[in-house]
Image (cartoon, rainbow, N blue to C red):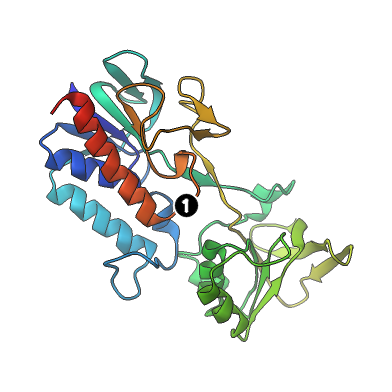
Amino acid sequence: MYDIIVVGAGPAGVSAALYAKSRGFSVLLLEKDEVGGLIKSVSHVTHYVGLSEGESGETFREKLENQIAEADIELKYEEVIELDLKYELKKVKTRQNSYNAKAVIIAMGSTPKDLGLENEKDIGVEHSALGLDDEIEDRIIFVAGGSDGAAKEALYLSKLAKKVYLIEEKDELGMIDEFKEKIENSDNIEAMTSSKIVSASGTRDKITEVCVYDSNEKEEKIFENGEDEFLIFAYIGQAPNTELVKDSLEMSGAYIKTDGVKTSIPGVFACGDIIDKKIRQIATAVAEGCTCAIEAQKYLGY
């Protein structure tokens, strides 16, 4: 039995595990995929203290992984499929094993949202540009989204692509001024607001047509392939990974409702993208992870 089990090894979960371990607790950190969560797939990590110059999602992920190892935290790559949290002894079941803990910290993160196109899987809409440099080079790229994340990826893609169209449904781009200025000064990024990708034709290897609906002009704009090859990237937000707890914890829509980081069940804490909050940044996720560990310490009576 463990004192604390942390589910999810993104920035929030790793922070929680580090702070819990530092307080002398026996900690198990469970991760179904790779350390880092969604941050591992971004081209450029920004606006967080202590970053190296040119920090990518992959280099940031490696730092988290190294911290886990240096702190001697037990990390297991197992997918959690069931959480029984209602009793004092919490049970966590993975595809391989079952574990018990006195407290559980949930940091299961989120999943990128799809565009909702009928043939989305067939044409291979991407959510990360990392590792795709050869495919991006000299292509025309469509980036759906107008947030900071969409802006960062559009700027990265523009270094390789022939042209980048930034497609935003709202009337204005929702990114910070720093990114707006960079996009306005870019030679090969064109922002299309009040617009939405409504269909695309072709295959993963060759998208032949992209249809963008302009809600202001009330018309569809058709981009046809010709000699150019298209790629589509979606950065339109994330859906919280709360399927396992939506029937056992008090929820606020799709998100876990918390009092700070405390959930509706004593001994169960939550942090990061899965909780109902206004700000979703690495800095807030890491702070919440720290707070989870401290609140778990209080709950355990130490």
- Amino acid under label 1? Ile
The quarter of the rendered structure image containing the C terminus is top left
Does residue 62 appear in this view? yes
What percent of the width, then of the height, locates residue 95?
37, 26
Q: Quadrant of residue 97?
A: top left
Q: Give the quadrant of the N terminus.
A: top left
Q: Is residue 80 left or right of residue 243?
A: left
Please tell me whether residue 107 is drawn above or below residue 87 in the rendered image.
below
Counting from the top left corner in percent of width and height, residue 89 is at 26, 15
Give the image location of residue 90, x and y in percent.
30, 19
Q: How many numbered marks does the figure carry?
A: 1
- Residue displayed at 46% across by 25% down: 245
Q: Residue at x 89, y 62 (%)?
A: 218
Which residue position holds label 1? 279
Would you place residue 59 above or below residue 268 in this image? below
Which x, y percent locates residue 273?
A: 45, 44
**Front in this rendered view, residue 115 or 176:** 176
Q: Residues within 10 Å of mark 1 (few under 14, many from 20)?
A: few
Q: Could you tell me which residue is drawn at 38 percent across and 52 percent down?
A: 284
As drawn, is 19 to the left or to the right of 279? left
Residue visible at 79% across and 63% down in the picture:
212
